[in-house]
Image: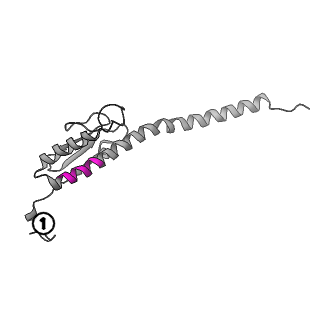
């Protein structure tokens, strides 16, 4: 009696492996794009944190936005999607993988990232500028 696998058994194993590869391939291909979007979202959070710090030291919102853009550009962070250029836009409008900061019509500062897979609402954070000291009644202000 000969030992070994028949051609049919080997063919079944190859078909099963092919089906598994078809199932796994799309998930693995999207993993890199998801990680790039996560990096953009992290850059949005960093910009919001930096902006909040600038609000504490700058007199008005426009000056705080300009100071934040300057501080973020000085970091030298590379665009996570393209791998080249800055991760932060010099102006209000970001290109793919960048984060831009602008003052909206609603009085809120919009920090918007240009993500690859995520929706536009997932890549935006709104920050309210601080109020004047006279309006902090009830919070220990004058």
Residue sitting at 39 percent across and 39 percent down?
36
> Residue 130, position in %: x, y?
15, 57
Magenta highlight on residue 58: no
Q: Which span is picked out in magenta?
A: 46-54
Q: What x and y, as percent, mark residue 49?
A: 26, 52
- Residue lying at the far right in this picture: please name it: 1
Query: Does the magenta stretch mainly form a helix, a strand or a loop?
Result: helix
Q: In which quarter of the view is residue 84 placed?
A: top left
Residue 78 is left or right of residue 7, and the answer is left
Specify whether 33 is left or right of 24: left
Residue drawn at x 24%, y 39% as measured from the top left:
73
- Residue matched to label 1: 136
> Observer-nearest residue: 10 or 41?
41
Instruction: Answer left or right for 99 relative to 129.
Output: right
Question: Which quadrant is home to the C terminus?
Answer: bottom left
Q: Would residue 103 be seen by someone viewing this image from the given angle?
A: no
């Amino acid at each position: 009696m000969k030992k070994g696998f028949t051609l049919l058994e080997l063919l079944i194993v190859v078909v099963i492996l092919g089906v598994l590869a078809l199932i796994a391939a799309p998930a693995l291909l999207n993993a890199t794009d998801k990680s790039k979007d996560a990096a953009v979202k992290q850059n949005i959070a960093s910009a919001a944190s930096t902006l909040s710090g600038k609000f504490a030291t700058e007199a008005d919102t426009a000056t705080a936005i300009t100071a934040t853009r300057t501080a973020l550009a000085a970091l030298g962070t590379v665009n996570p999607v393209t791998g080249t250029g800055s991760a932060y836009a010099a102006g209000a409008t970001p290109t793919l993988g960048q984060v831009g900061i602008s003052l909206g019509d609603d009085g809120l500062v919009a920090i918007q990232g240009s993500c690859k897979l995520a929706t536009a609402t997932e890549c935006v954070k709104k920050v309210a500028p601080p109020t004047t000291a006279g309006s902090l009644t009830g919070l220990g202000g004058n």
